[in-house]
Image (cartoon, rainbow, N blue to C red):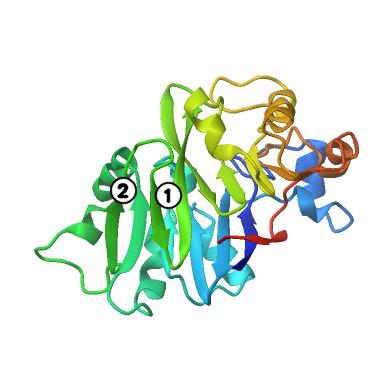
Amino acid sequence: MQATLTFLGSGTSMGVPTLGCDCAVCRSAVSADGDPRNRRTRPSIRLAYNDRTVLIDTGPDFHAQAVRENIRRVDAVLYTHAHADHVMGFDDLRPLSFCVQGNLPIYADDATASAIERIFAYTFRTEDRYPTSARVQLHRIDSTPGASFDVFGATVRRVPVTHGIQQITGYRFGSAAYLTDMSDLPEESVPLLQNLDILILDALRRDPHFSHSHLEKSIAFVEKLKPRRAYFTHMSHDLDHAVTEAALPPHIRLAYDGLQLQFEIA
């Protein structure tokens, strides 16, 4: 089964341009003669397959991303973790949830699910519930590495990744994997990432960071896992698109907002 993956956002938690910054990359992101690939909203992807639309994360830019990509329907959402740049667009699911028969399925590990229930408590309360709250059903996924669940005919597997002092959830779906916000990869996750067509992973900046992989480290992950194609995401204004990509081998590219990739999801 063929799928189309769209990068809704490829930026870091502060976005690019970063507010108050006048660096060359931030200027390029907004300049009429700059590189539009340097304009990076908060990280998220859309999967389209089997006449369905599945999102991974809904950050604070989700409304603008959905308008840009003409997203008129969402059938499920998977969450990686509960940091603001990954969940704060949750409330923008409200009108889209009204289009789903029943409730919109939401998938998250236990810690993420609990945080979403706390942050958006008004959505989940059963008494005095606001009538236009999002109509969702939260599914807690098994935390076991490689644990799988079906999403409209595609098998999705949980791939644990290290994010600073946390362990959060990456996902593999068919021949692709999405590992945002990772600083390291537990050994038990390595067998889950073999024989990939597409590997998407964190590459925050050039210098090391305590909770994100940096450019050199991300290249080493690609060399270890040997996917056919790799794309870096969650990038800061430290990485100019054209300059950085020119120094990479041809099978490693930088993602950018709106980039679409085709792959086998099942």
Dot 1 and dot 2 residues touching (CB under 8 Å):
yes
Assess disc 2: are there few (<14), some (14-19) or many (≥20) residues with their C-alpha within 10 Å of its C-alpha.
many
Compared with 143, 259 (above or below) is: below
Residue beneath disc 1: 79
Residue beneath disc 2: 116
In the rendered image, the quadrant that contains the C terminus is bottom right
Compared with 68, 20 (above or below) is: above
Q: Is residue 106 left or right of residue 218?
A: left
**Whole-percent x, y for residue 87 in the image:** 42, 49
In the rendered image, the quadrant that contains the N terminus is bottom right
The residue sitting at 78% across, 52% down in the picture is 37
Query: Which element carries disc 1, helix, strand or loop?
Result: loop
Q: Nearer the viewer, residue 69 or 232?
A: 232
CA distance for labels 1 and 2:
10 Å
**Whole-percent x, y for residue 120 in the image:** 28, 53
**Whole-percent x, y for residue 179 in the image:** 56, 40
Q: Nearer the viewer, residue 50 or 57?
A: 50
Query: Which element carries disc 2, helix, strand or loop?
Result: helix
The residue sitting at 51% across, 64% down in the picture is 63
Query: Which badge, 1 or 2, is on the more N-terminal residue?
Result: 1
Assess disc 1: are there few (<14), some (14-19) or many (≥20) residues with their C-alpha within 10 Å of its C-alpha.
many
The residue sitting at 56% across, 63% down in the picture is 47
